[in-house]
Image (cartoon, rainbow, N blue to C red):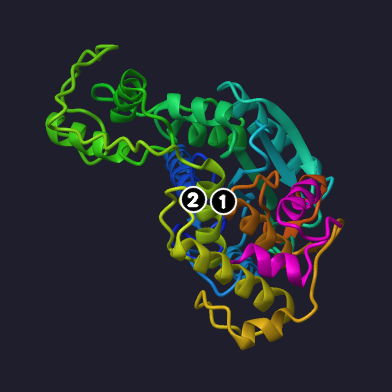
């Protein structure tokens, strides 16, 4: 059989790179995508990778993905790999399909069942006619968008991390697609990620601590890791390993991390390519990043043609004009307001692109307006937006 598979959104580091939470969607969906492709090919099928890494807008990226998909014919299924994100409390796996096509429903349910067998909650199959990547495809294949797990859910992230890598989820998706049990690749010793996970627990390193990369790199050098990230010789992992402090710089920050600001910085990077360090500190670069988010939203919603320079000048002022967003609306300006609130340390209950102005954002905005002596009407108007960017 022939399949197309792609990781959703732009690559990490580019604008429109998807959701961020305890991990980044565009990083992990590509790892999972590679595992899916590996197992489908291992089973003897042809797979075309239709991932797109950059584009001037989210819609342009989706169009480019579909253009690549439509290059191929006699395709059995087109699989789009994503990570979900909402408010930190939602969790589990789900598959989205465009129509009531029975073959699509059956394959999507098999994928959900296979992923949930790994410990994730099965949220089931959902019909979504609003997702652009599920429509406008003419290669004969059924279209399925896989929301593997919620990247902002501590429960889901712990499950994913405990697996050690993306391989298990990729294998589960491939098995759901093919309705067949697949053999695991031969392993030569324990996987590096399994060792790393145990070491993280022993050292009490939280998911947001960037020094975990230093731990991983130190392990690679000490153990002699092969290119496929397996260890050359089996080792016994002590649950309380002795790690020379001189070799690993844990660099604990005595100042508590503001998680909302840190997540806001990651969302700003994804939405407007701000290049912020997610350190949880609201400095001058973070303030400029918030302005870039508003400039990007005005370009997407109103074709304002603003330069994303992080400077609030006459052109940005004129583009904002009397624009506002309120409850019930869906716009990219809503996305910007959600991110701006996070960069101020508030929690708007999730970030979407384009943003959906729901109850979480409404209540959060009213609280911000009260705290800053603004009219507490729950409407993000000119005065509120200008207050958020400064």
Q: Mark 1 vs mark 2: which is more N-terminal?
A: 1
Q: Position of residue 8 (x, y in %)?
A: 57, 55
Task: Work out whether residue 261 or residue 234 is closer to the camera in this orientation and state it.
Answer: 261
Residue at horizontal 69%, vertical 27%?
122
Q: Residues within 10 Å of mark 1 (few under 14, many from 20)?
A: many
Residue at horizontal 41%, vertical 30%?
206
Q: On the rendered structure, is 6 left or right of 278?
A: right
Q: Position of residue 181 (x, y in %)?
A: 53, 25
Residue at horizontal 81%, vertical 50%?
362
Q: SS class of the residue under badge 2? A: strand
Q: Position of residue 13 (x, y in %)?
A: 43, 61
Task: Work out whether residue 62 or residue 263 is closer to the camera in this orientation and state it.
Answer: 263
Task: Work out whether residue 286 or residue 8 is closer to the camera in this orientation and state it.
Answer: 286
Magenta-colored span: 362-390
Q: Position of residue 37 (x, y in %)?
A: 47, 45
Q: Is residue 233 above or below residue 47?
A: above
The residue that disc 1 covers is: 3
- Answer whether residue 307 is visible to the viewer in this image: yes
Residue 43 - label: none
**Residue 271 picture quarter:** bottom right
Residue 46 - label: 2
Q: SS class of the residue under badge 1? A: strand
Q: Is residue 334 magenta?
A: no
Q: Are marks 1 and 2 in contact (CB under 8 Å)?
A: yes
Q: Is residue 363 magenta?
A: yes
């Amino acid at each position: 059989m022939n399949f197309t598979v792609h990781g959703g959104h732009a690559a990490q580091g580019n604008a429109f790179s998807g959701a961020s939470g305890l991990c980044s969607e565009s990083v992990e969906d590509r790892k999972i995508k590679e595992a899916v492709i590996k197992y489908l090919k291992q089973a003897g099928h042809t797979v075309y990778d239709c991932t797109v890494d950059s584009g001037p807008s989210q819609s342009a990226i989706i169009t480019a993905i579909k253009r690549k998909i439509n290059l191929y014919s006699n395709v059995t299924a087109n699989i789009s790999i994503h990570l979900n994100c909402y408010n930190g409390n939602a969790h589990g796996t789900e598959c989205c399909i465009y129509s009531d096509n029975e073959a699509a429903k059956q394959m999507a349910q098999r994928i959900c069942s296979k992923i949930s067998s790994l410990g994730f909650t099965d949220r089931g199959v959902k019909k979504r006619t609003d997702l652009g990547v599920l429509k406008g495809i003419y290669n004969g294949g059924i279209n399925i968008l896989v929301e593997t797990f919620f990247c902002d859910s501590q429960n889901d992230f712990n499950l994913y991390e405990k697996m050690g890598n993306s391989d298990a989820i990729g294998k589960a998706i491939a098995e759901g697609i093919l309705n067949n049990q697949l053999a695991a690749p031969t392993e030569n010793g324990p996987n590096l990620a399994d060792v790393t996970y145990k070491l993280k627990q022993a050292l009490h390193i939280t998911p947001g601590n960037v020094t975990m990369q230093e731990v991983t790199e130190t392990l690679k050098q000490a153990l002699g890791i092969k290119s496929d990230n397996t260890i050359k010789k089996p080792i016994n992992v002590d649950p309380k390993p002795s790690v020379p402090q001189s070799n690993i710089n844990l660099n604990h920050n005595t100042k508590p991390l503001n998680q909302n600001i840190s997540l806001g910085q990651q969302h700003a990077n994804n939405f407007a390519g701000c290049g912020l360090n997610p350190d949880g500190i609201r400095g001058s670069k973070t303030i400029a990043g918030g302005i870039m988010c508003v400039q990007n939203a005005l370009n997407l919603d109103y074709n304002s043609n603003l330069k994303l320079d992080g400077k609030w000048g006459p052109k940005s002022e004129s583009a904002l004009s009397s624009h506002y967003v309120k409850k019930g609306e869906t716009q990219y300006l809503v996305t910007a307001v959600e991110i701006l609130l996070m960069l101020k340390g508030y929690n708007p209950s999730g970030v979407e692109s384009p943003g959906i102005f729901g109850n979480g954002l409404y209540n959060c905005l009213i609280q911000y307006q009260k705290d800053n002596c603004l009219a507490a009407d729950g409407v993000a108007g000119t005065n509120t937006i200008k207050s958020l960017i400064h």
